[in-house]
Amino acid sequence: MRKLHGKAAKNMASVRQLTHLERLEAESITIFREVIAEAERPVLLYSVGKDSAVLLHLARKAFYPSPPPFPLLHVDTTWKFRAMYDLRDRMAQESGMELLVYQNPEAKERGINPFDHGALHTDMWKTEGLKQALDLYGFDAAFGGARRDEEKSRAKERIFSFRSANHRWDPKNQRPELWHLYNARKNKGESVRIFPISNWTELDIWQYIHLNNIPIVPLYFAEPRPTVERDGMILMVDDDRFPLQPGEEPVMRSIRFRTLGCYPLTGAVESSATTLPEVIQETLLTTTSERQGRAIDKDAGGAGMEKKKQEGYF
Amino acid sequence: MSETSLNEPIYKTDALIAEDIDAYLDVHQHKTMLRFITCGSVDDGKSTLIGRLLYDSKMIFEDQLAALEADSKRVGTQGQEIDFALLVDGLAAEREQGITIDVAYRFFATEKRKFIVADTPGHEQYTRNMVTGASTADLAVILIDARKGVLTQTRRHTYLCHLLGIKNIVLAVNKMDLVDYDQSIFNRILMSYRAFASELGITHFTAIPISGFKGDNITTLSENTPWYHGVSLMEHLETVEVADSAAAQKPFRMAVQWVNRPNLDFRGFSGQISSGVIRPGDAVRVLPSGKTSTVSRIVTMDGDLDEALAGQSVTLCFADEIDCSRGDVITIADDPVECADQFEATLVWMDEAEMLPGRAYWLKIGTQTVSATLSVPKYQVNVNSMEQLAARTLDLNAIGVLTVTTDRHIPFTPYADNHDLGGFILIDKISNATVAAGMIRFSLRRADNVHWQATDIGRAHHATLKNQKPAVLWLTGLSGAGKSTIANKVEQRLARMNRHTFLLDGDNVRHGLNKDLGFTDADRVENIRRVGEVAKLMTDAGLIVITAFISPFRAERDMVRQMMQPGEFIEIHVNTPLDEAEKRDVKGLYKKARSGQLKNFTGIDSPYEAPESPEIHIDTTALTADEAADAIVAHLIP
């Protein structure tokens, strides 16, 4: 952004207005720095998606020329797309940050998977896995890439979201958040989840990735991929663990993903967008919201995410 | 989309997006941002208006719309029509109650701007939510139901927005469709609101007749109100000046968040610029130290900048190695901010537990957290009538004006000048809850307007010249315990060792510096505070200070300890049992106290709080005064 504006700024009398992306970026950087100053053991929850990519980029900007003074934590379900694991390892190396990967040992032992276990899969690998990892390492502050525009219950969550010792979120008892003053104080055992990109929209994320050339998983771009169609969702057959039903045959379709999670739970869209501007173009012209591609929101009716969050899900 | 029952949205940029996405992106990357708050009573149609803005700016997708149509029929309040309010009422609990209960943030964008809307509830018990939403808003939309006119709630919302310093106020007279778009009704409301607003000192606001439900004057001017000659609500939101631009034209201020030290060659100070513009070569001053330097670089990951302005997060490097840490404020050198430790402030109480005057809370302002105590309120403000009421405390949602005293000098500005350096929160030290929001009106200790003058010859230099380490030997104990005798002997010994000392004696000080003070608890506290300050100056000058004061209260001795550099305060308990001291009664004071001629005498009718873990303990029943003096000197100079 600054490159775009450098020349313009000099030509203007004395002051220019910051663009919306500059204001958002500055706010996010401020949030990162406040946490570092006030928390004892922070961690960045890195899920490899586009929001995580922006989150990591902002963290690097906040502390430059120092590397971000906290590790990356990937709460793995073993069911992510292969391309996500590739980018995860590459980005950890590039940023000079420590990468911690956590897989819930109980879920692993019981062979919990999205095909046979439905909602239990998300609960055990993600919700329980996250809680276990935070407890194991004793993290008292965890950065997450959630945005308020994603979902209704997120719209009401604070940027510094306080969690009880058993990780529960109490939507009726949130700390007021005024100006840029964040209260990160907590008692032993309690923690905060921090959402530096709370005020970004999906379009802001895409534009920022575009402007800053931030590396993202290639699955966001259209390419012919092996797919099957189930319950109106196009699923990608990413590896040979995908159980095909009788008569089901993978079909090559030009697809891309608007959001990335566990591959058996993430619906693709048919697309021909192979560049970022084309992806943005499709996003803007689309008529369905982002999370629609994810099965997770459909549980428990309209309050699905709110319920999951109270239980400790991000 | 099912457009039969809805007005066609005008914000259709689809053509440009489809034709030339690069051109579209270029336009959008230059958009500015406006944050605003909507305030209204429960039935003013606030959620409907926000839903309408989202819908009209194409922020509602087909799947959401389908869900909305289904929900509208099931739980909506608009019959078979689409209930936009359902789009914004987020949490399950409030969907059941049909009201909004917390602050929620919504997003939409037009070709010119990105908008963040703070949606806050209107009912009285949630003042704290409205104040929260207003704290980051550039503009406030105050909704009025055209059928009801200016209500008590309208006054409250306006007062709170004004209190939080929102300069742009829009009066949206809603539900005009239900009063047949009657101009006289609109005018009547306008007159009544203007009268009230001017009482508060609001000189300027923009009034727009709208219907959130029908869409009148939201994105386009409505044919139903030909008598209205202003702009649509959306056009106003798109063109009004944002606070950032104004902040950039004020003097430079940045609170230091974090000191960036990746290696020995780099030392930068990270923060978000709160006001003004900064360029390499600019002379800056760091407060509260008052030290000055010059900006050598403005560092970002995208490369060094030639200039940075209000709102940006940057890292500054200085030409000189000067002390600067988190909580300090960097300002332009010739126009710094004030430092003070006592303020008059307006407080909004946000906790279920009421405020306790005298209790210490954490106060977070800028990037610094200090300990602070509150006075009894000068007055409480009735947010409905704006009357000033007498109050002994503040409870949930109460607003009052009072004195805040911090445990050290902090750089600040009045809230009206700069929200970042004049707005603060209070945090309960036990529960860690955010219990209040405050706005500094002005400092109460005018003498402190003179900020600390940094001198070239520092305390280390003074001490080196005297070839000694400064210290405070603080003798505490009952009257007649032998403090003055021992102190005198200590000073004699140190003098023989060529140490530079000064003895501050309780009786002597009361003849001069503290002759205005008596012996009440409050005066004893002040007596010790002054002695502490004098002792501190003397240690800065490199001296070894010996004090002989009863100093009966633990809290004040600890206060003096906090004033000193770590390790320099040596507490010496001259321990003589009360009956022994009374038996000695060198000055005949115990006799007078016992007979009632002397009030507030320590040990008789005023308590003595013995030190819990003094550096040195002297048992005068076991040691002579000379032995005690030797022990103290041996501790100081081993």
Image (cartoon, rainbow, N blue to C red):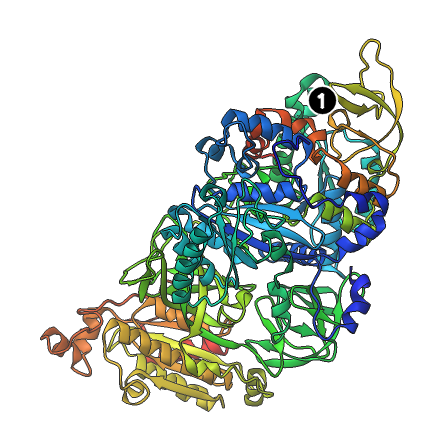
Which residue is depicted at the point 84% across and 13% down?
A: A248
For the residue pair B57 and B148, the one nearer the viewer reads as B148
- Among the 4 quarters of the image, the one containing residue A306: top right
Question: Which residue matches tag 1?
Answer: A114
Position of residue A260 in the picture relative to residue A24 (left or right):
right
Subunit under mark 1 = A
Q: How many marks?
A: 1
- Is residue A24 shown above or below A254? below
Left or right placement of residue A237 versus residue B344 in this view: right
Of B390 and A54, nearer the camera is B390
Determine the image quadrant of residue A64: bottom right
Residue farthest left in this picture: B595
Q: Residue at x 46, y 34 (%)?
A: B98
Where on the picture, by quarter, is residue B320?
Answer: bottom right
**Residue type at tag 1:** Pro
* Name of the residue lying farthest toward the top: A246
Find residue A106 and report its horizontal and vertical position in percent: 66, 25
Mark 1, secondary structure of its residue: helix
Q: Is residue B24 visible?
A: yes
Q: x, y (%) of residue B225?
A: 54, 50
In the rendered image, the quadrant that contains the N terminus of chain B is top right
**Coordinates of residue B329 in the picture (x, y in percent):** 59, 71
Q: Is residue A54 above or below residue B555?
A: above
Residue B434, visible in the rendered structure:
no
Q: How packed is label 1: few (under 14 Cα within 10 Å), some, or many (20 or more)?
A: some
**In the depicted view, which residue is nearer to us: B54 or A125?**
B54
Whether B503 is drawn above or below B198: the answer is below
Tell me which residue sits at (57%, 24%) in the image: A300
